[in-house]
Amino acid sequence: DVQLQASGGGLVQAGGSLRVSCAASGFNFDGHNIAWFRQAPGKEREVVSCFNSGDDSTYYADSVKGRFTISRDVAKKMVYLQMNTLKAEDTAVYYCAADRDIATMPMGKYLDHWGQGTQVTVSS
C-alpha cells in the first residue's frame, strides 16, 4: 500500500523551531518529487515547499523563505521540513505529498499521493 505518514507536529511558541517528518512507502520514492502543503482553519491549502527529485532543487513559498528547509533521505524514504523562527501564522495542518510532475506540483491538484497531515500550532 502507498503511504505518506506525516509526524512531528505539535505546539511551539513563536520564535521556536519544529521539524515535521514524512515517511514514504509503497511507491518509487526516488522517482517522485515531494512537497509540503499546509492548510489553516478557514483558509485554502497552500504549498509551503517542494523538493525536485531530478536535480535536488528546492522551492519555498515567500512566506517561509529563509525560515523553513526541506530535505529528504532517500535511503530512509523520509522527507523533512525544518521550521525555524515560527510565527503564529504558520499554524496549520501540514501535509506531505508526492508526484512525478514537478511543474504542476505547487498547485497541489491531482497529485499522485497525499499524507494524512500533522497539526502545527504556534502560540504567540
Image (cartoon, helix red, strand yellow):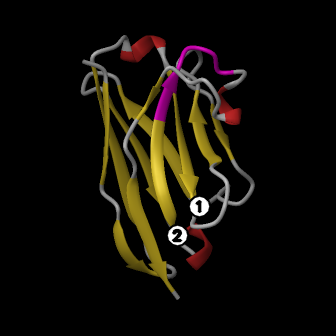
Q: Quadrant of residue 57?
A: top right
Residue 64 included in the magenta stretch of the image = no
Identified at 63% across, 16% down, the residue is 101
In the displayed structure, 13 sits above or below 22; it is below
Q: Count residues near mark 1 (Cα–Cα under 10 Å), then give few for <14, some for 14-19, many for 20+.
A: some
Distance from Cα at disc 2 to Cα at disc 1: 14 Å
Q: Please say whether residue 101 is one of the residues in the magenta stretch.
A: yes
- Of residue 114 and residue 63, the one placed in the foreground of this image is 114
x 59%, y 18%: residue: 55
Q: Is residue 78 left or right of residue 101?
A: left
Residue at 27 percent across and 16 percent down: it is 26
Counting from the top left corner in percent of width and height, residue 37 is at 56, 46
Q: Nearer the viewer, mark 2 or mark 1?
A: 2
Camera-nearest residue between 42 and 99: 42
Q: Amino acid at mark 1?
A: Arg
> In the rendered structure, which segment of residues is drawn in magenta?
97-102
Label number found at residue 79: none
Image position, residue 12 (x, y; %):
39, 77
Instruction: Say whether residue 46 is left or right of residue 11.
Output: right
- As drawn, the label of residue 91 is 2
Establish if 10 lies above or below 93: below
Residue 67 badge: 1
